[in-house]
Image (cartoon, helix red, strand yellow):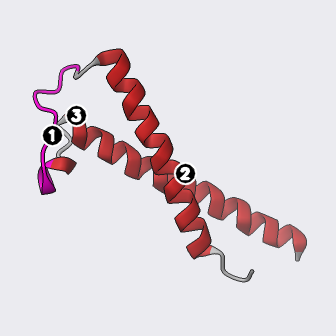
Amino acid sequence: MKNPIILCFVAGMLTGMGNGSVFGAALMCFLGRGKFDDWGGWFGDAYNMTTFTGFIDWSMIIFGIIFFLILFLAMKKHAQLEG
């Protein structure tokens, strides 16, 4: 496979966002709502970092991007070693 970026993006985002949601569930179990004034909302409010839902949504996105980068770098290094 010459350019695995699409495969890495899909697999990395699915895995990372899944782990981010587990992180959010664990956070909710241990802390409850914590110091967040609001759970969140619909549309743009769902990504507001001052709400619990916004914090978890951003955590999922960041986890997804990090997993994508890890997977892409691993595939790139594997291609170099095989080539």
Check disc 1 and give the amino acid type.
Gly
Q: Position of residue 46 (x, y in %)?
A: 18, 48
Q: Residue at x 64, y 58 (%)?
A: 71
> Badge 3: how crowded within 10 Å, few (<14), some, or many (20+)?
many
Q: Secondary structure at mark 1?
A: loop
Q: Earlier in the sequence, mark 1 or mark 3?
A: 1
> Badge 2: how crowded within 10 Å, few (<14), some, or many (20+)?
some
State the residue position of label 2. Answer: 15
Q: Position of residue 11 (x, y in %)?
A: 58, 61
Q: Residue 35 in magenta?
A: yes
State the residue position of label 3. Answer: 52
Give me the disc on residue 40. 1
Q: Position of residue 4 (x, y in %)?
A: 65, 75
Residues marked 1 and 3 touching at CB (< 8 Å): yes
Q: Secondary structure at mark 2?
A: helix
Q: Position of residue 24 (x, y in %)?
A: 37, 33
Check disc 2 and give the amino acid type.
Thr
Q: CA distance from mark 1 to mark 3?
A: 6 Å
Residues marked 1 and 2 touching at CB (< 8 Å): no
Quarter of the image with the C terminus in it: bottom right
Magenta range? 34-45
